[in-house]
Image (spheres, grey):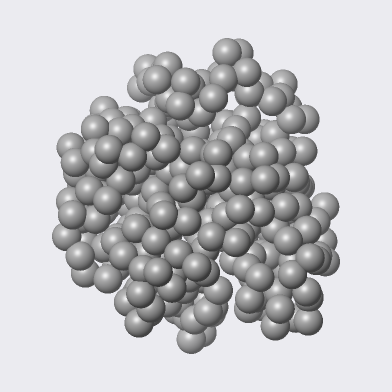
Amino acid sequence: MRPARTLAEALRAEVLVLDGGLSDQLEAQGCDLSDALWSARLLADGPERIEEAHTAYVRAGARVLITSGYQATFEGFARRGLGREEAARLLARSVELARSAADAGEREVWVAASVGPYGAMLADGSEYRGRYGLSVRDLEAFHRPRIEVFAAAGPDVLALETVPDAEEAEALLRAAEGCGVPVWLSYTVEGGRTRAGQDLAEAFAVAAGNDRVVAVGVNCCDPADAGPAVETAVAVTGKPAVVYPNSGERWDARARDWRGGSAFDPGRAAAWVRSGARLVGGCCRVGPSGIAALAGALAADGTDVADGTG
């Protein structure tokens, strides 16, 4: 059901469980994502499959759904011959599909419009490196038009996610100014630094004092890196932390496949919460079963997890 509270109000009261990897659930449903647009292709070709995936996460216990907008850009759709008007319609659809799945349930579910990094549009793994050779102003100009479309579609929050470096974070925060929707900022990290190699405390500092930022943290990182990053995020910004690591497997951009085994342990979530995390979930290779296990582990630990009753 549609939340009666803002996301910020909810975070002051309890912990919210996020969903997991949308693409993983889509593949489990039989969708072919071997495409530069990744899951964004289905906004045009199979929107009902996206809503089905969102619904699977609601049933698993997710209280926040992250939309399929991560790799949806004007530039990416233009390469498929779609004009800006049609591309804008598809961007907005990503929010609408998540909202439809969220509203169909009996508990409060919030919608986070996914705003992926510039590297996601390149579809070559650049989001795990950063340092694109673009200025902050260039990156702001890239992000602002689609942020405006996402915001107009009515999400509860913008998820500025999988950000590889502090310069892009600065650009994203600038691009979101005046959009009327709160944001969370989430870096992808490795070994206590951004993927671009920057000190994580300095990277989180770009969000300190920004009232539009409701949470700061990490996603799409090794689960072992999540805990220390949560502690740093809270210490630097004083804001609630958001944390949703991947399974620990590694993405091979050339082979377009995952390598290694899973290290995602739902039992770690309680420690993240004790360190200040208020939004907790999973990213790549963490499906509905992982989210259900995470929600169960938090409940078993006595964490005050949102049940949606308001």
Q: What residue appears at the point 53 percent right and 56 percent down from the top-left corner?
A: 115
Above or below 67: residue 145: below
Q: In the orientation shown, which residue stands out farthest toward the top? A: 310
| Left-right relation of 204 to 292 | left
Q: In x, y percent, where is residue 181? A: 54, 39
Residue nearest the observer in this picture, 109 or 115: 115
Q: In x, y percent, where is residue 15? A: 43, 26
The quadrant in which residue 90 appears is bottom right
Residue nearest the observer in this picture, 85 or 231: 85
Look at the image and tell me whether residue 29 can be seen.
Answer: no
| Left-right relation of 224 to 12 | left
Give the quarter of the figure containing the C terminus. Answer: top right
Residue nearest the observer in this picture, 160 or 176: 176
The quadrant in which residue 169 appears is bottom left
Above or below 229: residue 30: below
Q: In x, y percent, where is residue 245? A: 39, 51
| Left-right relation of 298 to 66 | left
Q: What residue appears at the point 37 percent right and 17 percent down from the top-left corner?
A: 302
Count of numbered badges drawn on the protein: 0
Q: What residue appears at the point 54 percent right and 60 percent down from the top-left corner?
A: 144
